[in-house]
């Protein structure tokens, strides 16, 4: 195993309260250690910034919906080919890159861990196979549980087996955590193109409400002690006035650990169908009072995106906006899927407001440990736009220049013109892009540079242009191996599959089997993924 | 002397000739050009292995010999003249932005695909998807002219946004598929299933045609704008019967499943008989 | 003794099956034929130009042929697993080859406009009208109607008296050549635009009334719906109908391996169906395979007239090299994608001492690297 000594860099390791201290960092056998021998390879990091590898808590990179998006967007990748080399597989880029390209580009960006945030458990084999073809990064996926008819039945009946069932599902799929997407609403959409109006609406045919689903699954995940709490994409995404639903959802989960995905898309005031306003300040206030909650922002970036979601109703709304491409796929018992290519325009009122609300969430004084960076790739923009987003946060002059280009009317409805002079420090960037996501994911060995941590390290030139700085790290080291130097991939490796696990009573199978028989077209025995080739190399993170 | 490439034999696999356009050969000697690497199947070979190269690079480039396996001739070209003495492979002039390509013989599929500007003239016939967008694209050809003296294959002008595809012979089925605007003319008629999803484009058929459901017969008239366009076709060397300039056409409006601002114009044969 | 089995006799991948000998329960003639052909595939482990050879010699010959090829093609995948396809695209990338999933659905309509689809269970539990459009699943996917349940009104569009048509509640019998016109007319009616009256108008109005009367409907289609423009028109119709109700399509692939292979090709390269890697990166292969000099055919019939390296459980006529594989789902495990894209793990109830296509493709890759 290689030994590396990184000398002279300014260390930004907020989890260990290190803020720019210049000192050496030593790596051995894939871990951070106190010291290494004299024969260790030395990386001269003088004048550079050293951070833990990036951790993306919410993105869409693998599985049937991502491949469906690739099919839909064959035009988007044509001008972004990636050539095969001795080391690398060929591929294509664009908004939804091919699998190898996804791994390479995340690594080139200094990211070492990425979470696929919405996998249908029924398609776990497909998700796993794609992740296996996504090299470099360590990866995990969250399984969609918020519209699962079997769980609806257990919840309705107040079954004591709910926790066991969730743990069983993680075990069956290799998933890392539990995701709720528009709980109850996707089932309603599949039933009748319906939408949830209140958390107390009854989900037809199941005699449960979204509130009961959120409450029961949130509590179950909390009770299981899974490494990552319930990950919530709340009801009514994108709808004016949805902040009320978001707050209601938060209140429902009060006192329990929860992560709210792409909060920007859930922070709107106004009336459904009417003009949108920002309610970001209120949501931030609520968060400040509830340390048990975290969020990622889901910033939209002006330019092309592709909305790729389990919340298929939203896709039909976007479909009808401009009549462009639309793909829908209903997955029995579990979920839906909608895909619509979309362009966020600076001059458009709604888009500029969305952009502004995202920045408000970042800038209005929230705790960076609670408010993490995401674009909900590729929904708000590609992960490749993270460096630009970082510059927006760190560079007030640049931000004001960009503000000037956005729809005035929209920006006036945000707090961005109120002399908002906050500029993120390097440590705060390190928090929102690695330390906080890793902590929230329960990845104790990631997101920091303390002794014993994974040797996932990204080293940047300390450039004034933060976009440039974060676009092309000087070095990226993962698992103690040097993978990237100055924008070039030097070594290719498979990342780890991270799975979450909690013990469960195997007798739950007797409860689930008959319910499966009634609902699924796949036999209970054939549902769990057993093929070791799909599940390795893995690291299992146990419940605590 | 103009730079001339003469194919030595038919190459063992398909060749991507896009690196050689007047812009890149201008001012270069035959020996230099012969040393340029191009792709043949999965290999890279020197131009000299496949072509005898003579002359000196100017604004004009001439290709001769058996060119049926030579693809992407003039693809992405921005100016100058390219003359193909014979028939060529696929994607000739694809995404070109300016200049002129003349093909004495037939062209393969995707001739002038996603053309941005300039002129592609095909003296023979063109394969499928002449002037079309590549699969999945929301906007194909956005300018320039494609003139085909013979017939065109299926889906000519699919997804086009602007410009002209003029066909002296017949257009295959599915012409003008999902076109946004622009014009596809086939003097000897367009095939079935024309204009599906057409938003604002014009499809002109010199022979009778039964438009798809979604098109509605609008008017029978002598369209002055079309006469103008047909005269332009004459200038471009197509044989346009006088009757088409003076005779009556029937206009079908559609695709009504889309914006319904497009049209299919069909020449009235009765008028020919009468004239 | 009866063995539980996931049948790969067609894209339905029925996973509730047991086999006794080659008889399946629940009964399925197609599935039995599929199993029988693979349980006694027998034959030489390998052959070179028709003469029996050992596997190593056959692999050497394959490496030699591919090493010299100017325009190699990897194709087939009719009966291949996801693992086979993965290995094939990996090798194709190394070779700079063309890859074609022979029986993949035409990707054009989806790339142009998208589509709306669902898994079998969604259709079974919700659709009240199922329109089978010029397909005969009773023959090609014998248990489809059973697996979709008996709740829905079955409408069959076909002018042939097929076994499926015999089970229809409603039959619509226009000729194949009028399908596009019919779909477009339905769409015109759906939009409440005037329709030029013709002989189909009455039947079409009747069908539309049925669709309007229910909250869920499904269209089952396949190669019978001639060409990508008809598929495009169908997807557009489904989209229009989806405004007021939930409507989906279910494509019937002609073989069991194509869905998985097509997914692999798409995730590894970004493009479906046919991809050219000759330039060093993936390009959508649009033209015909003219000029191919050596083909590697994976679990499928070979193409006539091309020097072929066949990696296949079943015998392949006229192959320059044939290496017999362990039949997926019978003798070798692997992943397959059901026609609705649900991935399933094929079992190997009767393991055989033969390699999989994936293993052979990897060995060819190693041979080429030497
Ligand atoms: S329907 Fe198809 S998969 Fe099912 S048993 Fe018959 S052949 Fe096998
Ligand atoms: Zn998301």
Image: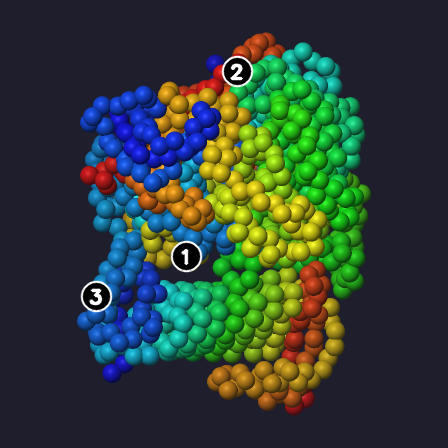
Looking at the image, is mark 2 or mark 3 nearer the viewer? 2
**Disc 1: which residue:** C288
Examine the rendered structure and indicate whether residue C80 appears above or below residue C269. Answer: above
Q: Left or right: where does residue C202 sit relative to residue A172?
A: right
**Disc 2: which residue:** A543
Looking at the image, is mark 3 or mark 1 nearer the viewer? 3
Residue at image x 31%, y 34%?
A: A8
**Disc 3: which residue:** B35
Neighbours of disc 3 within 10 Å: few (<14), some (14-19), many (20+): some
Asked if residue C225 shows in the view, the reply is no
Write down the chain letter for disc 3.
Answer: B
Residue at image x 26%, y 55%?
A: B43
- On the image, which quarter does residue B109 sit in? bottom left
Q: Nearer the viewer, residue A216 or A241?
A: A241
Q: Left or right: where does residue A273 sit relative to residue B184?
A: right
Q: Nearer the viewer, residue C15 or B165?
A: B165
């Amino acid at each position: 195993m290689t030994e590396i000594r990184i000398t002279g860099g300014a260390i930004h390791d907020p989890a260990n309260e290190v803020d720019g201290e210049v000192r050496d960092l030593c790596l051995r056998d894939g871990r951070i250690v106190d010291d290494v021998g004299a024969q260790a390879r030395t990386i001269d990091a003088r004048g550079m910034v050293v951070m833990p590898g990036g951790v993306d808590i919410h993105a869409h990179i693998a599985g049937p919906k991502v491949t469906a998006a690739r099919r839909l967007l064959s035009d988007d990748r044509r001008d972004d080919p990636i050539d095969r080399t001795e080391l690398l597989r060929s591929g294509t880029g664009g908004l939804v890159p091919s699998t190898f390209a996804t791994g390479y580009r995340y690594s080139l960006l200094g990211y070492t861990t990425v979470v696929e945030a919405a996998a249908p458990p029924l398609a776990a084999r497909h998700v796993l196979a794609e992740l296996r073809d996504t090299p470099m990064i360590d990866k995990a996926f969250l399984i969609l549980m918020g519209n699962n008819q079997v769980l609806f039945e257990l919840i309705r009946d107040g079954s004591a087996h709910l926790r066991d069932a969730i743990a069983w599902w993680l075990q069956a799929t290799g998933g890392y955590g539990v995701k709720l997407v528009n709980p109850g609403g996707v089932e309603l959409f599949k039933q009748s193109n319906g939408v949830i109006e209140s958390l107390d609406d009854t989900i037809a045919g199941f005699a449960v409400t979204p509130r009961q689903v959120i409450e029961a699954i949130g509590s179950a995940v909390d009770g299981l002690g899974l490494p990552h709490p319930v990950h919530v994409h709340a009801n009514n995404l994108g709808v004016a006035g949805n902040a009320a639903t978001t707050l209601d959802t938060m209140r429902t989960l009060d006192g329990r650990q929860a992560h709210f995905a792409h909060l920007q898309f859930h922070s709107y005031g106004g009336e459904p169908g009417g003009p949108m306003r920002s309610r970001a300040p209120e949501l931030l206030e609520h968060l400040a009072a509830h340390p048990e909650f975290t969020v990622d922002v889901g910033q939209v970036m002006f330019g092309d995106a592709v909305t790729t979601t389990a919340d298929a109703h939203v896709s039909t709304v976007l479909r009808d906006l401009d009549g462009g491409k639309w793909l829908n796929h209903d997955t029995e018992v579990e979920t839906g899927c909608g895909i619509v290519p979309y362009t966020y325009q600076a001059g458009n009122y709604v888009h500029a407001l969305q952009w502004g609300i995202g920045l408000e969430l970042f800038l209005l004084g929230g705790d960076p440990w609670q408010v993490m960076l995401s674009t909900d790739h590729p929904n708000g923009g590609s992960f490749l736009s993270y460096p630009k987003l970082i510059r927006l946060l760190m560079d007030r002059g640049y931000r004001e220049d960009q503000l000037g280009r956005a729809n005035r009317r929209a920006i006036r409805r945000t707090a961005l013109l109120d002399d908002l002079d906050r500029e993120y420090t390097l440590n705060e960037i390190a928090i929102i892009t690695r330390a906080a996501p890793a902590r929230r994911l329960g990845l104790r060995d990631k997101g920091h540079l303390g002794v014993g941590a994974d040797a996932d390290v990204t080293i940047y030139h300390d450039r004034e242009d933060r976009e440039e700085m974060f676009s092309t790290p000087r070095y990226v080291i993962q698992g103690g191996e040097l993978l990237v130097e100055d924008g070039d991939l030097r070594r290719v490796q498979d990342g780890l599959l991270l799975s979450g696990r909690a013990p469960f009573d195997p007798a739950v199978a007797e409860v689930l089997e008959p319910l499966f028989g009634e609902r699924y077209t796949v036999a209970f025995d054939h549902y769990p993924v057993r093929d070791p080739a799909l599940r390795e190399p893995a690291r299992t993170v146990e419940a605590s | 002397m103009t730079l001339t490439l003469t194919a030595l034999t038919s190459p063992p696999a398909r060749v991507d000739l896009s690196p050689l356009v007047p812009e890149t050969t201008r001012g270069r000697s035959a020996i230099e050009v012969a040393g340029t690497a191009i792709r043949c199947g999965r290999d890279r070979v020197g131009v000299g292995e496949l072509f005898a190269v003579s002359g000196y690079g100017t604004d004009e480039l001439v290709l001769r010999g058996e060119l049926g396996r030579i693809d992407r001739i003039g693809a992405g070209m921005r100016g100058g003249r390219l003359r193909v003495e014979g028939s060529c492979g696929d994607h000739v002039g694809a995404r070109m932005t300016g200049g002129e390509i003349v093909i004495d013989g037939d062209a393969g599929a995707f001739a002038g695909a996603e053309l941005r500007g300039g002129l592609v003239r095909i003296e023979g016939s063109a394969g499928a998807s002449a002037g079309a967008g590549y699969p999945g694209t929301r906007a194909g050809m956005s300018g320039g002219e494609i003139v085909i003296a013979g017939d065109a294959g299926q889906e000519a002008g699919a997804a086009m946004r602007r410009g002209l595809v003029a066909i002296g012979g017949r257009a295959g089925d599915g012409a003008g598929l999902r076109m946004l605007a622009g014009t596809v003319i086939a003097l000897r008629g367009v095939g079935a299933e024309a204009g599906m999803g057409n938003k604002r484009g014009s499809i002109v058929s010199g022979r009778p045609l039964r438009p798809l459901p979604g098109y509605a017969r609008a008017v029978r008239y002598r369209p002055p704008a079309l006469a103008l366009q047909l005269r332009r076709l004459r200038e471009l060397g197509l044989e346009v019967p006088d009757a088409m300039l003076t005779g009556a056409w029937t206009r079908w409006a559609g695709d009504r499943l889309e914006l319904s601002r497009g049209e299919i114009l069909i020449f009235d044969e009765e008028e020919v008989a009468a004239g | 003794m009866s063995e539980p089995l996931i049948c790969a006799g067609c894209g339905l991948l029925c996973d509730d099956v047991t086999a006794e000998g080659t008889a399946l329960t629940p009964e399925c003639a197609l599935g039995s034929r599929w199993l029988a052909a693979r349980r006694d595939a027998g034959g030489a482990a390998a052959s070179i130009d028709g003469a029996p050879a050992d596997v190593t010699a056959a692999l050497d010959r394959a490496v030699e042929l591919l090493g010299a090829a100017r325009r190699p093609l990897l194709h087939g995948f009719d009966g291949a697993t996801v693992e086979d396809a993965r290995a094939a695209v990996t090798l194709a990338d190394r070779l700079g080859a063309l890859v074609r999933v022979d029986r993949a659905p035409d990707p054009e309509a989806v790339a142009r406009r998208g589509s709306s689809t669902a898994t079998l269970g969604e259709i079974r539990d919700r659709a009240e009208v199922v329109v089978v459009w010029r397909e005969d699943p009773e023959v090609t996917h014998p248990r489809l109607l059973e697996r979709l349940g008996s709740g829905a009104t079955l409408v069959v569009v076909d002018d042939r008296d097929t076994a499926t048509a015999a089970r229809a509640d409603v039959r619509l019998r226009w000729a194949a050549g009028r399908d596009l016109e019919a779909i477009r007319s339905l769409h015109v009616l759906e939009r409440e635009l005037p329709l030029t009256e013709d002989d189909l108008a009455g039947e079409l109005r009747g069908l539309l009334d049925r669709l309007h009367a229910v909250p869920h409907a499904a269209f089952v289609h396949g190669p019978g719906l001639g060409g990508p423009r008809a598929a495009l028109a169908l997807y557009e119709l489904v989209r229009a109908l989806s405004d007021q109700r939930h409507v989906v399509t279910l494509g019937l692939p002609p073989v069991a391996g194509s869905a998985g292979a097509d997914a692999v090709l798409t995730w590894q390269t970004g493009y479906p169906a046919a991809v050219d890697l000759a330039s060093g990166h993936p390009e959508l292969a649009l033209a015909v395979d003219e000029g191919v000099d050596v083909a590697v055919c994976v679990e499928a019939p070979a193409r006539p007239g091309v020097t072929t390296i066949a990696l296949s459980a079943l015998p392949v006529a006229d192959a320059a090299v044939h290496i017999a594989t362990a039949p997926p789902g019978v003798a070798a495990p692997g992943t397959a994608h059901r026609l609705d894209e649900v991935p399933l793990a094929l079992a190997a109830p009767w393991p055989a001492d033969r390699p999989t296509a994936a293993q052979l493709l990897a060995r060819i890759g190693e041979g080429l690297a030497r």
